[in-house]
Amino acid sequence: MSKYGPSLFVVEMYLALQEKAQDLVGNLEKKKLYLLDSNFDLSNYNFFNRVYKDLSSYRRLIDQLEEVYDFPDEVNAGKVKETIDDFLARDG
């Protein structure tokens, strides 16, 4: 199956997914440091569970977009996907 060149809208969506995933990982790292000094309760577990699901969804969406579109190297999500995979493998 040949891939299509993405429209500007698709590239912007692709970049937004990458940015959102990076922000989630950064926020989770900060929250985990805070939780080391506090009690871990069920609400924190639910928060982390929801965010891990969101990260997994972003990762799948990025993969699905890459299956259809041929993105230029300048917007490649390789580093973002690696960050998500590392985080989920370590903490997910």
Image (cartoon, rainbow, N blue to C red):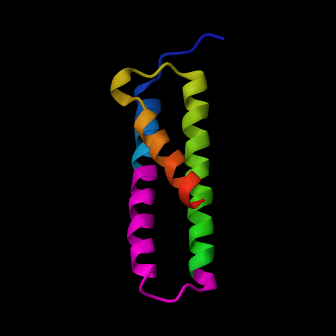
Residue furthest to the left: 74
Image spot of residue 11 (x, y percent): 42, 31
Foreground: 46 or 14?
Answer: 46
Relative to 87, residue 41 above or below: below
Q: Is residue 41 visible?
A: yes
Image spot of residue 25 (x, y percent): 44, 57
Foreground: 91 or 10?
Answer: 91
Foreground: 37 or 10?
Answer: 37
Relative to 87, residue 29 above or below: below
Q: Is residue 36 magenta?
A: yes
Foreground: 44 or 39?
Answer: 39
Locate the N terminus and report the quarter of the image it occupies. top right
Magenta stretch, residue numbers: 20-43
Q: Is residue 22 magenta?
A: yes
Image spot of residue 46 (x, y percent): 63, 75
Please indicate whether residue 1 sits to the left or right of residue 48 in the image: right
Locate the C terminus and report the quarter of the image it occupies. bottom right
Residue furthest to the right: 1
Residue drawn at (61%, 66%), measured in percent from left and top? Answer: 50
Image spot of residue 53 (x, y percent): 62, 58
Relative to 58, residue 44 above or below: below
Please indicate whether residue 25 sits to the left or right of residue 43 in the image: left
Q: Main secondary structure of the magenta part?
A: helix
